[in-house]
Image (cartoon, rainbow, N blue to C red):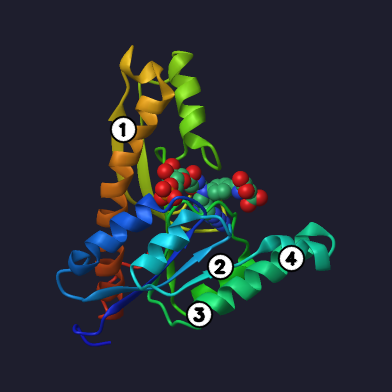
Amino acid sequence: MSPTTPARLTVLISGSGTNLAALITAQPTLSSTHPTSIVRVISNRKAAYGLTRASDAGIPSAYHNLASYKKRLTPESAAREAYDADLASLVLADSPDLVVCAGFMHILSPAFLRPLEEAGVRIINLHPALRGEFNGAHAIERAHAAFMAGEIQRTGVMIHYVISEVDMGEPILQVAIPLSHPDDDNIAVLEDRIHDVEHEAIVEGTRLAIEALWAAREGQNTAPSS
Ligand SMILES: Nc1nc2c(c(=O)[nH]1)N[C@@H](CN(C=O)c1ccc(C(=O)N[C@@H](CCC(=O)O)C(=O)O)cc1)CN2
Ligand SMILES: NCC(=O)N[C@@H]1O[C@H](COP(=O)([O-])[O-])[C@@H](O)[C@H]1O
């Protein structure tokens, strides 16, 4: 892969796509050495406004629907395994270098993770909390509740590599967000603060992941520990 080879990104979303929008805006500057392009946006939710953002930006998109698998296959574990295997095929068809989970609200099973690892495609995720804290869905709401209960005085945002254990992959970057009363008593205020940090962190984290990927491919040891 020569230094001029573009870095190809696939972005997985489930919602409004404000983090996708940050990546689209930053596309020309995502890597100082490798022209980067978002080759596809895939959502697990049909109503995700991020699909509109992708279309408006001229980026190919797809809706990958779990419900249709659940109707055809039982138990649910079989449906999820088939869904994830087909999602991997859908992603790999575009030959991406990196997959970015930008508010992707689906736990990825080995049926997805294994084919991508075998293809050398790394996956990163935006977690709206710090490492080891509030893993899983609804992290912001849980952090706010912990703050209001006096259990924490700060939360944060992390960009990390994706492994099977949810939100426990190697961190790429973390940004701490100090919390204070009374401003952050209002969860909407806190969410806005966290989202602002997310939009910067997802761009910087993606940039770092691209640089690490090229360094690894050029023989330097920056491969993430699994
Ligand atoms: N194997 C992994 N999959 C995912 C990771 C990861 O690190 N490893 N990161 C998540 C993103 N995420 C939090 O950052 C997250 C998203 C969704 C869920 C979750 O519980 N999803 C439920 C459905 C919830 C819903 O539809 O509202 C589910 O999949 O059953 C947990 C964590 C992306 N995936
Ligand atoms: N577990 C991951 C997670 O909960 N991510 C959350 O999804 C939102 C997506 O927003 P967006 O669709 O506007 O980018 C993000 O704000 C983030 O807090």
Asked if the beta carbon under badge 2 is closer than 8 A to the nearest atom of ligand 1, the reply is yes
Q: CA distance from mark 3 to mark 1?
A: 35 Å
Residue located at (48% from left, 14% from top):
149
Amino acid of disc 4: Ser
Q: How far apart are labels 2 and 3 at the CA level?
A: 11 Å
User: Where does residue 5 sit, x and y in percent of width and height?
Assistant: 25, 84
Give the mark nearer the N terminus: 2 vs 3.
3
Which residue is label 4 attached to? Answer: 68
Q: Name the residue at 65% across, 64% down.
A: 65
Image side of residue 30 versus residue 124, left or right: left
Element marked by disc 3: helix
Q: Are marks 2 and 4 in contact (CB under 8 Å)?
A: no
Q: Residues within 10 Å of mark 1 (few under 14, many from 20)?
A: some
Badge 3 crowding class, 10 Å Cα cut-off, few under 14, some 14 to 19, many 20 or more, is: some
Looking at the image, which is closer to me, 219 or 212?
212
> At label 1, which amino acid type do we have?
Arg
180 to 68, vertically: above or below: above
Q: Nearer the viewer, mark 2 or mark 3?
A: 3
Q: Is residue 25 left or right of residue 45?
A: left
Question: Mark 3 vs ligand 1: CB under 8 Å?
Answer: no
State the mark number for residue 108.
Answer: none
| Gap in angstroms between the C-alphas marked 3 and 4 | 21 Å
Q: Is residue 225 visible?
A: no
Q: Earlier in the sequence, mark 3 or mark 4?
A: 4
Which residue is label 1 attached to? Answer: 193
x, y percentage for residue 113?
Answer: 56, 67
Residue annotated with mark 2: 113
Q: Which residue is mark 3?
A: 92
